[in-house]
Amino acid sequence: MNPMNTTLAPTLSVPTVTRPVRPARRVIWRYFSILLGFHLLLPIAFFDPFFTWWFPVYLLVGNAIFGSIGINLAYHRLLTHRSLEVPQWLEKTFVMFGICSLEGPPFKWVCTHRIHHQESDVEKDPHSPRENFLWGHMGWIYTDDPRMNSFMTYDKYIPDLLEESYLRWLHKRSRWAQLYLAHIVLLVLAAAGVGAIFNGAEGAIHGAAQMFAWGVVARTVYVWHITWFVNSASHRWGYQNYKTNDLSTNSWWVALLTNGEGWHNNHHAAPRAASHGHRWWEIDLTYSFVRLLEIVGLAKKVVPVIVPKHRLQETEPVVAA
């Protein structure tokens, strides 16, 4: 009601409707600065001495190691869903690859993803794109979620991981972040050494510069965005094999970029299954790597595709990979 009108109509009372006001979201400036900083560094990759025509190799090999093995396999299928078992030394190695993608510590990554499965595309989902695409893609990353500041949340969602001494060690004193910085130094020094062998001091400079620009900065940003597309694009565009009561979809181009993670509706229908591709054309290279590990005896208890009957489409039978 306009207070200026109260003197003109003192006896008239008009009820007002009060809408609930969502608390203002707090930006985590440390996270935002890191994301912004890496994106601002990207242009240097296209200038001498940083540019190289071998950049697709840097991105594809970097994604295979740090994205597919580190994030898809270690963070997602091993830690989050326990889709298979590998020897402890191998699991620790794969987790280190995941850390080198700079997507946060394992505890937080796994906790967030388990909440996502429980609250998919409803109000409590940490990163549903229902609100807007940018939020589902990356806005949630640099925005504070009070749940992530409570030990009770971690105790509820990742009690199994809290018992692992190696993962606890990584979280103490942010050792996971120190490991990321250490991997930058190692990669740059290795590239400088190889360059020096073939072309002396000039080769060392070019090798170090190109590794930093393409093997670290561009590769990190590339793996970030293709991973985030699973949260954003694969909850907006694509097709559904199963009735999952959420917006998860199978997106062929996200699956292509992420080596299999884009078959997201399949994954929501059978979260623990090691394979995300359920039909012959749904290629999942991350699962192909799992099969290779299984063949050589380094993976066991690989969880098969088992979709509950209530999630099957009326005209679509389940197809196990």
Image (spheres, rainbow, N blue to C red):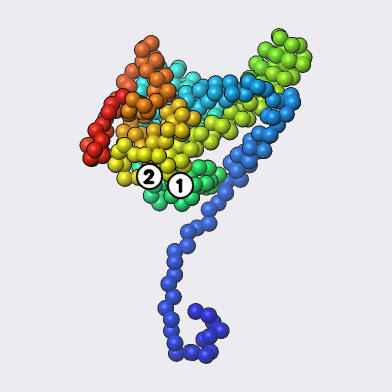
Image: 6 above or below 242: below
* Cα distance between the residues tagged 2 and 1: 9 Å
Q: Quadrant of residue 53?
A: top right
Q: Residue at x 67, y 38 (%)?
A: 40
Residue 16 percent coordinates (x, y):
44, 75
Residue 117 as seen in the image, left or right of residue 219: left
Q: Which mark is residue 129?
A: 1
Q: What is the x, y in percent for residue 65?
A: 51, 22
Relative vertical location of residue 127 with respect to residue 54 in this rendering, above or below: below
Q: How many marks are shown on the rendered structure?
A: 2
Q: Do the residues labelled 2 and 1 touch (CB within 8 Å)?
A: yes
**Image point (45%, 47%), residue name:** 129
**Residue extending furthest right?**
201
Counting residues from the start of the chain, the first of labels 2 and 1 encountered is 1
- 152 and 257: which one is in front? 257
Mark 2 belongs to which amino acid? Leu
**Relative to the observer, which residue lies in front, 111 or 239?**
239
210 with respect to 149 (left or right): right
Q: Is residue 15 above or below residue 104?
A: below
Determine which residue is flagged by label 2. 247
Dot 2: within a 10 Å radius of its alpha carbon, few (fewer than 14), some, or many (20 or more) residues?
A: many
Q: In which quarter of the image is the C terminus?
A: top left
Q: Is mark 1 on a helix, strand or loop?
A: loop
Q: Identify which residue is drawn at 42% across, 24% down.
A: 286
Residue 220 visible in the picture: yes
Instruction: Give the image quarter of residue 158.
Output: top left
Q: What residue type is labelled 1?
A: Pro
Tag 2 secondary structure: loop
